[in-house]
Image (cartoon, grey):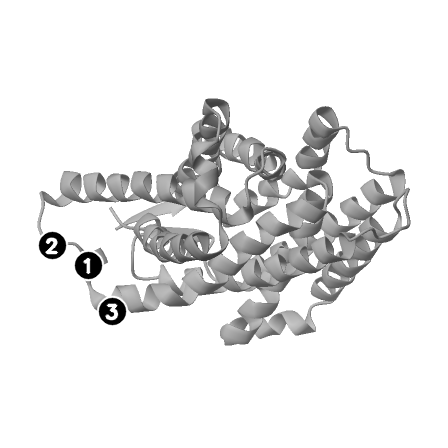
Amino acid sequence: MKNVSLRKIDIPATLVLLGITFTWSTGPLFVRQFYREGLAVWDMNLFRYVMAVLLLWLTVVLKHYARRGGGETAMATGRLWRRALMPALPALGAQVFFSWSVYYLQPGLVGILHKQSVIWAVLFAMFFFADERSLLRSGRFWIGSLCGVVGVVGVMALRKDVAWEGEWLGVLFIFIFSVCWGFYGVTIRRFTRHIDPVRGCTMVMTYMTAVLLVLFLFLGEPQMFRQIQVRVWGLLLLSSVIHLYLPYMGMYWVITHIGVTITNTTLLLTAFLTPLFSWLIFSEQLTVGQWGSGIILVFGAAITMMTERKIQEPELLIVPD
């Protein structure tokens, strides 16, 4: 075992984190474009996850054989596979409802609203971990939560067009996504306590891909794949690499170098980058009130997250050799 100080920030890890922040900011834009190309949520999700899971398993196997010289792997044990079911369910729900939300809402709006998931993650952590319930005595936690609620309401209320025009369904879906993603954050934290995080996430994504295949066969449009242009296939492959495979590989490496708090705080910047990119590509325009509400929402998420980190033990992260 080796100790990695989280107080030391190195340039390579910072650059990787900024790269992940940039690519994740484009996620809603890719999903929006896939809808424009005629792909349903089941179609786009299946292909992206199949490619990402294949790449992750290849990485896990190569990493295992490079370190141990072959043999049976811990990922084959039934006990670990059973434990992986718990985080797989909320992760699947988060992915499906996130993709659906972009069908009803503009990408920039989704990029801001889904930051409420940070607050849900803390609430679920308080339920599962007794030591985190001390947050209820923290004034900063309540301020952060209040800012989150005010921000979400403001983003939706302070629009140019006050007519909902079906957007309420997108708001509902992004709310369900946020709850699922918050729950996933807690369950994956429990699951990866005694297993390499990359291997653990690979097992979880394998379950997700299996269910996405079933959903695709029953609800998707398999015949559409014969009509997809090469350009769209390229975008699907690019999305699976830059939105799923590389971020999952890079995230845990970044955390071991610069820490959980700095990593998650930096990722909050996607709430501002996504609307900017959506404005440049799809001409989406947020009002001044929406930008202000978005800032309040992100501020609340940041306060809540950093308050939670203060009550946790490690300023030092232990990772396996």
Task: Write down the residue under mark 1.
Answer: 76
Query: Quarter-wise, where is residue 234 in the image?
Result: top left
Name the spot of residue 206 as percent of width and height, x first: 34, 53
Name the spot of residue 242 as percent of width and height, x first: 46, 33
User: Gap in Å between the C-alphas at discs 1 and 3?
Assistant: 9 Å
User: Gap in Å between the C-alphas at discs 2 and 1?
Assistant: 7 Å
Name the spot of residue 99 as percent of width and height, x first: 58, 48
Measured along the vertical axis of the image, is residue 279 above or below residue 32?
Answer: above
User: Gap in Å between the C-alphas at discs 2 and 3?
Assistant: 15 Å
Task: Write down the residue under mark 3.
Answer: 79
Q: Could you tell me if residue 91 is visible in this image?
A: yes
Q: Residue at x 77, y 52 (%)?
A: 167
Q: Which mark is residue 72?
A: 2
Badge 2 amino acid? Glu
Badge 1 amino acid? Ala
Q: Residues within 10 Å of mark 3 (few under 14, many from 20)?
A: few
Q: Residue at x 62, y 58 (%)?
A: 178
Q: Residue at x 48, y 58 (%)?
A: 91
Q: Residue at x 89, y 51 (%)?
A: 163
Measured along the vertical axis of the image, is residue 169 above or below residue 277?
Answer: below
Q: Are marks 1 and 3 in contact (CB under 8 Å)?
A: no
Name the spot of residue 61 as percent of width and height, x first: 20, 43
Q: Are marks 2 and 3 in contact (CB under 8 Å)?
A: no
Q: Along the horizontal axis of the image, is 17 left or right of 117? A: left
Badge 3 amino acid? Arg
